Image (cartoon, rainbow, N blue to C red):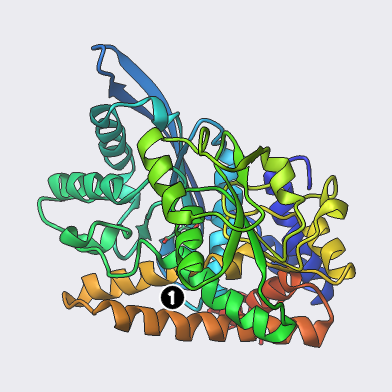
């Protein structure tokens, strides 16, 4: 892993750019963000005092459509991180073949310490500060780490308050009752599973044991869906601890415990392990579904899983992906593995624009179709260029973007 996350994002891009022998002007065009917005958001806290939070939005590239990407609330948010995440969104949206550019937002805060009222005022404050730059045809936010449909609902309502009318397509990941789409809540996990099924067909692992890092929107739901289809989940973790049971966890009981106590700690009949230990377990499939930078040159030699499904953004460094590939392991890159989230966000936006909503089966069928095509495109590039799937995903996405640059007249055809 590069020391900083933006450096890491660039090094993923550069591996593919070097193979494609990209021209310097193209590299320059594709690696500089279009717009960086930083705002101070004053929030009245429950104790009556005002606290000022720093909020960011990076709109990296809008050459393929309005920019799109989630908003993260986390104490470790930095501009560098938001920039890297917006860069990843740009390439993810190409791989997923949704007509969007890439963006990301973030607020430095610890939402776990907030009351609902404080969370609402912060979320409204973010839109108040950013609304000029956001919109269904401009830039469309969505949930990310520690934001959810309720936060999206406050945001769409605040936009309504400012504009004087509803614009449901200005944000996705909304509740079903307020312009949301069937299947959006499970989309990241479900999309990941469709891709995983394709990978298993190619690689062939029988009766796999699975470990999942992270127990939020991606991790918890992927655990639930996989265990429902008969897969054995031997370990899961949240930000505080991991739990391990060799003959498989009862995932629904784990979810009930987590919802009740807000933690995995204290769950009976399991071995407590650390997040680091979880990554190094003897499992067939490892699913990092929390934060970036967890598998790097430092621990890659201890990673044993045959398939790594990157449901988080940026969990595996470019160098680690290459080393896994050399060891015969397969890391399915984030910009493919977790693109089910933004794919159903796209469906939500389409439904909002036409004011007509699809049934869940219809959404899932369309999602599966897109995920299978995305996997095939990346897999073919990996065979053609004899590179890991991460580099292959960038090769595929950059080649597409170069065509866009040509048609738009930035460079000669
Ligand atoms: N935050 C999610 C991601 O990283 C979803 C983005 C979206 O739906 O716009 O892909």
Residue 349: % across, % down = 30, 69
Image position of 11 with respect to 63: above or below: above
- Identified at 71% across, 77% down, the residue is 205
Position of 353 relative to 73 (above/below): below
What percent of the width, then of the height, locates residue 3?
77, 40
59 left or right, relative to 147:
right
- Whether ligand 1 has any atom under 8 Å from the Cβ at mark 1 is answered as no
Examine the image and state in which quarter residue 413 appears: bottom right
Badge 1 element: loop
Query: Which quadrant holds residue 184?
Result: bottom left
Front one among 45 and 30:
45
Image coordinates of residue 200 in percent, x first then y, are 66, 80
Q: Quadrant of ligand 1?
A: bottom left
Residue 334 image point, x, y percent: 61, 63
Residue at figure coordinates x 47%, y 46% from the top left = 145
| Nearest the eye: 135 or 218 | 218
Left/right of residue 359 with respect to residue 210 in the rendered view: left
**Is 13 positioned to the left or the right of 45 in the image?**
right
For the question of whether residue 319 can be seen, the reply is yes
The residue labelled by disc 1 is: 99
User: Is residue 341 in view from this perspective?
Assistant: no
């Amino acid at each position: 892993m590069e020391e900083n996350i933006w450096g890491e994002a660039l090094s993923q891009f550069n591996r593919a750019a070097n193979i494609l022998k990209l021209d310097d002007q193209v590299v320059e065009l594709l690696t500089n963000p279009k717009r960086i917005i930083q705002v101070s958001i004053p929030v009245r806290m429950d104790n009556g005092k005002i606290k000022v939070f720093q909020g960011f939005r990076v709109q990296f590239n809008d050459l393929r459509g309005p920019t799109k990407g989630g908003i993260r609330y986390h104490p470790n948010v930095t501009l560098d991180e938001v920039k890297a995440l917006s860069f990843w969104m740009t390439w993810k949206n190409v791989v997923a073949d949704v007509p969007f550019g890439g963006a990301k937002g973030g607020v430095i805060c610890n939402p776990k310490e907030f009351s609902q009222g404080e969370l609402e005022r912060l979320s409204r404050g973010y839109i108040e500060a950013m609304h000029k730059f956001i919109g269904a045809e401009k830039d469309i936010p969505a949930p990310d780490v520690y934001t959810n449909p309720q936060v999206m609902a406050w945001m769409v309502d605040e936009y309504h308050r400012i504009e004087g009318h509803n614009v449901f397509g200005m944000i996705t990941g909304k509740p079903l009752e307020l312009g949301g789409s069937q299947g959006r809540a499970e989309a990241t996990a479900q999309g990941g599973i469709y891709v995983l099924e394709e990978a298993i067909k190619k690689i062939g692992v029988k009766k796999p044991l699975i470990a999942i890092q992270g127990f939020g929107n991606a991790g918890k739901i992927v655990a639930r869906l996989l265990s429902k289809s008969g897969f054995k989940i031997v370990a899961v973790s949240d930000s505080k601890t991991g739990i391990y049971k060799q003959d498989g966890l009862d995932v629904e009981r784990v979810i009930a415990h987590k919802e009740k106590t807000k933690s995995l700690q204290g769950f009976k009949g399991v071995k407590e392990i650390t997040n680091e230990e979880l990554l190094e377990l003897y499992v067939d499939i490892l699913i990092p579904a929390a934060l970036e930078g967890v598998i790097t040159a430092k621990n890659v030699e201890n990673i044993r899983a045959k398939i790594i499904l990157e449901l988080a953004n940026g969990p595996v460094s470019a160098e680690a992906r290459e080393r896994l590939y050399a060891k015969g392991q397969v890391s399915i890159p984030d910009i493919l593995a977790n693109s089910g989230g933004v794919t159903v966000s796209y469906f939500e936006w389409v439904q909002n624009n036409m004011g007509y909503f699809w049934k869940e089966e219809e959404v899932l069928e369309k999602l599966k179709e897109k995920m299978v095509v995305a996997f095939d495109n990346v897999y073919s590039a990996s065979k053609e260029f004899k590179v890991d799937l991460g580099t292959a995903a960038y090769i595929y996405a950059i080649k597409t973007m170069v065509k866009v640059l040509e048609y738009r007249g930035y460079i000669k055809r």
